[in-house]
């Protein structure tokens, strides 16, 4: 058994993978042969990931706030604290905070043989985000 002590420092997510201010706390990266990884990701209002996919899929669980998630070619969906999202292996998607609220989720995914757990595409532009979020407002 390994006990992973709380890490007090969050790191800012890389700008080539996220817009606005996003912070990541590494919860766990399992020892080999496991490839499991878990993170807590904190999005400021309007912040979001770029389009990306995971070789073995991803599980997100929203712990605070409200956000948005979209699979390529499908409508955007509103997500709130308590919601869980499962993406399929290789499924292009993005996720982030709603325009006026913070959002935090736990992300769990598995790395491939090259220890890569995500393959990144282009950023979701401000115009795409505004057009997408306008369609989800009540």
Image (cartoon, rainbow, N blue to C red):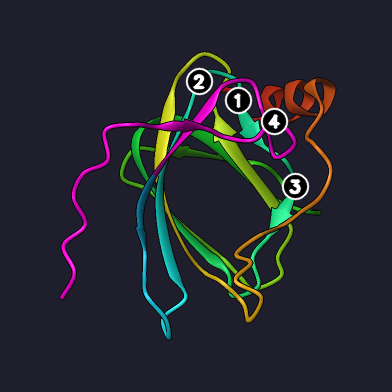
Q: For the point 63% across and 32% down, which residue is it?
A: 48
Q: Are marks 1 and 2 in contact (CB under 8 Å)?
A: yes
Image quadrant where residue 16 sits: top right
Label drawn at residue 51: 3
Give the residue pinned by disc 2: 44
The residue that appears at 59% across and 75% down in the rendered structure is 56
Residue furthest to the top in view is: 100
Is residue 113 or residue 134 the one in the foreground?
113
Residue 59 sits above or below residue 90 on the image: above
35 relative position to 123: left or right = left
Q: Nearer the viewer, residue 107 or 77?
A: 107
In magenta, the rendered stretch is 1-25
User: Residue 39, percent across and down?
Assistant: 41, 50
**Residue identifier under label 1:** 47
Can you give x and y, in whole percent of width and height, for residue 38 in the image? 39, 58
Closer to the N terminus: mark 4 or mark 3? 4
**Nearer to us: label 1 or label 4:** 4
Label 3 neighbour load within 10 Å: few <14, some 14-19, many 20+: many
Q: Position of residue 70 (x, y in %)?
A: 67, 47
Instruction: Estimate the spatial distance between the alpha carbons at disc 3 and disc 1, rounded to whole Å.
Output: 13 Å
Instruction: Say whether disc 1 or disc 4 marks the residue closer to the N-terminus.
Output: 4
Location of the C terminus by quadrant is: top right
Q: Say whether disc 3 or disc 2 marks the residue closer to the N-terminus.
A: 2
Q: CA distance from mark 1 to mark 2?
A: 5 Å
Q: Which residue is mark 4?
A: 15
| Between marks 2 and 4 in the image, the one whose residue lies nearer the viewer | 4
């Amino acid at each position: 058994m390994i006990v992973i002590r709380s890490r007090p420092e969050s790191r800012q997510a890389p700008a080539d993978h996220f817009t606005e201010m996003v912070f990541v706390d590494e919860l766990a990266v399992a020892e080999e042969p496991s490839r499991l990884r878990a993170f807590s990701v904190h999005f400021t209002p309007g912040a979001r990931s770029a389009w990306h996919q995971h070789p073995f899929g991803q599980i997100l669980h929203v712990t605070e706030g409200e956000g948005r998630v979209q699979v390529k070619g499908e409508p955007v969906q509103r997500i709130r604290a308590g919601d869980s999202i499962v993406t399929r292996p290789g499924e292009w998607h993005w996720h982030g905070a709603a325009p006026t609220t913070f959002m935090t989720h736990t992300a769990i995914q598995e790395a491939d043989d090259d220890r890569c757990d995500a393959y990144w595409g282009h950023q979701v532009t401000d115009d795409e985000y505004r057009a997408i979020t306008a369609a989800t407002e009540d």
